[in-house]
Image (cartoon, rainbow, N blue to C red):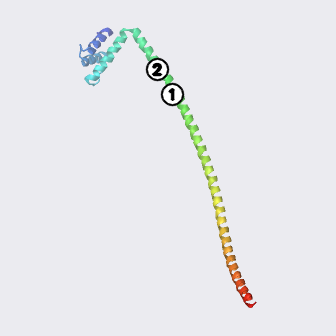
């Protein structure tokens, strides 16, 4: 590697600015690093060169590099904190779902019990109505029988009265 980091950075910047062919610069960087250049399109190589140029700029400015690393650390910590908050909230939601399911099961059980009690009351009322119907039918049958008997007796008494009144 005969070039310095600054010269590699300048070469990358030249490729980004269009003064050098990005694919050639990318291949040179891969060869200089001892890595095999990946088979990529020119657009992908341009992105790779742009990323390398940014890296080279950061290496030239350690303060900027430290600032960006600190920003990444802060972002990582914020992400971890948000993930922890999300876990806590998910646990709360899961607990709320369990409570809701338990309340739903209790409500369903109460409704089933009330329905059973209501059906039992309806069945009892139906039985009482049926018994009253049967009693009414029996009373009506007795009343008809009694009415028929009364009509026969009345007819007989009427006939006897007629005989007595004719004889007198």
Q: Residue 152 carries which label?
A: none
The residue mark sitting in front, 2 or 1, is 1
Question: Residue 65 lies in what quarter of the image?
Answer: top left
Q: Can you say whether 157 is above or below 2 in the image?
A: below
Q: Can residue 37 be seen in this view?
A: no
Residue at 52 percent across and 31 percent down: it is 90
Q: Is residue 32 visible?
A: yes
Residue at 60 percent across and 50 percent down: it is 112
Question: Residue 27 lies in what quarter of the image?
Answer: top left
Left or right: 19 in relation to 79: left
Q: Residue 128, image x and y in percent? A: 66, 62
Q: Residue 23, image x and y in percent? A: 25, 19
Q: Are the residues flagged by discs 2 and 1 in contact, CB closer than 8 Å?
A: no
Left or right: 69 in relation to 108: left
Residue at 41 percent across and 14 percent down: it is 68
Question: Residue 2 lies in what quarter of the image?
Answer: top left
Residue, disc 1 = 86
Measured in 3D between alpha carbons, the distance from the residue under mark 2 to the one under mark 1, in whole angstroms, is: 15 Å
**SS at mark 1?**
helix
**SS at mark 2?**
helix
Q: Foreground residue, 163 or 157?
A: 163
Q: Residue 43, image x and y in percent? A: 27, 23
Q: Residue furthest bottom?
A: 167
Q: Which residue lies furthest to the front in this view?
A: 168
Left or right: 111 in relation to 76: right
Q: Foreground residue, 59 or 102?
A: 102
Residue, disc 2 = 76
């Amino acid at each position: 590697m005969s070039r310095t980091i600054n010269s590699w950075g300048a070469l990358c910047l030249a490729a980004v600015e269009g003064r050098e062919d990005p694919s050639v610069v990318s291949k040179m960087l891969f060869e200089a690093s001892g890595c095999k250049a990946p088979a990529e399109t020119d657009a992908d190589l341009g992105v790779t060169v742009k990323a390398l140029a940014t890296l080279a700029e950061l290496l030239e400015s350690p303060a900027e590099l430290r600032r960006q690393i600190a920003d990444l650390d802060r972002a990582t910590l914020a992400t971890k904190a948000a993930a922890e908050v999300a876990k806590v909230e998910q646990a709360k939601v899961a607990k709320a779902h369990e409570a809701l399911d338990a309340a739903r099961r209790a409500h369903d059980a109460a409704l089933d019990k009330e329905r059973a009690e209501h059906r039992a009351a309806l069945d009892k009322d139906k039985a009482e109505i049926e018994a009253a119907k049967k009693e009414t039918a029996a009373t009506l049958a007795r009343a008809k029988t009694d009415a028929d008997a009364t009509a026969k007796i009345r007819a007989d008494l009427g006939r006897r009265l007629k005989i007595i009144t004719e004889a007198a």
